[in-house]
Each structure stands twice: as C-alpha cells, then as structure tokens.
Amino acid sequence: MPEPERLPAMSSPAMSNVDAVEATRAPARPDRRVVSLRLARGWLVLPALLLLLLAFVGPVGWLLARAFTQPQPGLQNFELLWQRPGYLQVLWNTVAISALVTPVCLVLGFPIAHAMATGSARLRRWLTFIVLLPFWTSLLVRTFATVILLQRNGPVNALLMGLGLASAPLPMLYNLPGVLAGAIQVLLPFVIFPLHAAMARIDPAYMQAALTLGARPARAFLRVYLPLTLPGLLTGATLVFISTLGYFVTPAMLGGPRQTMVAQMIQDQIAQFGNWGVAGALSLLLLAISGILFLLLHLAIGRKAAWR
C-alpha cells in the first residue's frame, strides 16, 4: 500500500519569522509558583514592617511634627535655635566631636582590617573574636570600664607615670579626651568590618603587579590598594560619624559641660523643661544631617562603581 504524501517541511527562515510573531503576540505569563513565592516573601516581611511603623516611624514622626506645632504652629523653634548661641554651640560640639572620632577610628581600624583580610585563618578567627567581644557587654558597662581606666589613679595614668611620660596624673575624665576615648573604643568595630569586607575582595595580584612594574611599596599602596578600599572606608566613616551624632551615654558620663551634645540637649529639653518643640527641631536637624551623609555616601560609591 503506497504511503501518503508528506507535506514539505517549512523552511527555517519562515519558522523563525512565525516564532517571532507569536512571541510578540502572546507574551509569556509569569509562573504561578514564582508569583506565589513573591507573595509569601511579602507576607513574611509584613510583621517587621508593621513593627517598624509602630515602634519607630510613628513616635519619631510625632516628635518631628511637634517642631512645627509646639507651642504654636510655625517655625519659631528653628528661629530659636538660630538666635540662641547655646544651641549653636551644642550643634558645633556634636559635629566637631564626630569629625574627630571618625578619622581616628579609620586610622586605628585600617591595620586591624588588613590583618584580618590578609592573615592566616587562625589570626582571622582570633581578631574577629576580639573585635566582636565588646558587643557581648552593655554599652553602659563598657563606659563605666572606661571611667575606671581613665581616672586619676587608673591604669592609664599609672602606665604613663611609670614610663616617665607624665610627672603627675593627667585629667582624662569629664573633658574632650575622655569623650573621644569612650567613643572610639565603642565605634571602632563599625569601621573594621566594612573595611575587612572591602579588603577581602581585593586580589593580591594587583599589588604584586604594581611592585613588579617598579612601583615602590608606598606608591603601590596609595595608587592601587587604597583606592580599592574606598567603599569600605566611606561606609565605615559614615557609620561612625552618624553614630557619634546621636551619642548620649558616652558624653554624659565621660564629658563635661563643654562637651554637651545634641542628644543630651534633647533629653534636657523634654525631661527638665517639657519643651517638645525645641526637642523636635533638634531631632530634625540630626535627621537632616544623617540623610545628607547617606546621600553623599550613595553618590560617592556610585561614582566609584562608574569609574570602574
């Protein structure tokens, strides 16, 4: 029995054209499993968002709104901050202390982060343990320990006098050195870990290539290694600076009247005077400074990525 004739196969150009037309006419629908997975992730995030809204956004927004409504609607609270020198001095103290703490943390944290990134696995584990150890204790306890170390009869003064670097106990408490020492020992890990993350991604072959091509170690470090660590440096510096802006416990326990910071002023305005309007204005200024710093960090890291 003769076989029926088979239709000639359509040529490949025609098939490709048909596929293209069908693809444009009938776009692929997203898989239901993918959609359900995304919805499930959204429901998982919802409790955290509600908690953040109720515990943070609501109270902070209520406080910031009082800057424009207490004691009466208007901008009189911001005018008061500008007219009274005491408020401007406190703002200057806060920015100046933050600007002093940040570079010291960067200088001290850079070699530790480098040792963690380039050292052996055993050294990395020990350094990570030492850096994380302070987080296991309360900030208040650590500040009290700093008071014990820096007092006139404390170990630091005893060491300086034993080495002949001081003939009498130095005043290290209730002044600027005490605030700086307390802030640095608390905020140093916030520089070390971003720097370590940036250094761990740097290929050691870059420095070896620079040295092979004739660059001196200092020049190779400044022209090759240091620019690659800029994202970690900027992130750590921003974290330290913004954290210092809102410090309360450290300047209250280690500083004097001349080292009063904005967080202390906000607490005094609310607890002693009941002046919620001025407290809200000070809080809004801190929030504005923090937002500007985050914006500058985002722009700096974005430009660095674009240059690469």
Image: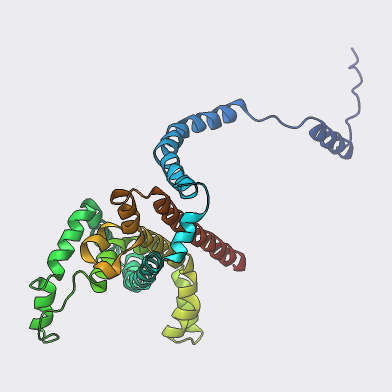
| Residue drawn where x is 28% and y is 64% of the image | 183
| Up/down of 105 relative to 79, above or below | below
Q: Is residue 143 left or right of residue 289?
A: left
Outermost top residue = 1
Quadrant position of residue 23: top right
Residue toward you, 278 or 43: 278
Residue 238 visible within the image: yes
Residue at figure coordinates x 51%, y 84% from the top left: 213
What is the x, y in percent for residue 260? Answer: 30, 65
Residue located at (37% from left, 63% from top): 240
Residue 41: give x, y in percent of width and height: 50, 33
- Image quadrant in which you'd find residue 233: bottom left
* Quarter that holds the C terminus: bottom right
Q: Nearer the viewer, residue 281 or 157?
A: 281
Q: Tell me which residue sits at (92%, 20%) in the image.
A: 5
- Horizontal placement of 44 versus 33: left or right? left
Residue 201 makes an appearance in the image: no
107 or 119, which is in the foreground? 107
Quarter of the image that includes the N terminus: top right
Q: Is residue 54 above or below residue 151?
A: above
Above-or-below relation of 74 to 253: above
Count of marks placed on residues: 0
Q: Position of residue 137 (x, y in %)?
A: 20, 52
Q: Nearer the viewer, residue 16 or 143?
A: 143
Residue 80 placement (x, y as % from top left):
45, 60
- The colour scheme used to paint the residues is rainbow
Please state if 160 lies on the left or on the right of 79 as rendered: left
Above or below 139: residue 3: above
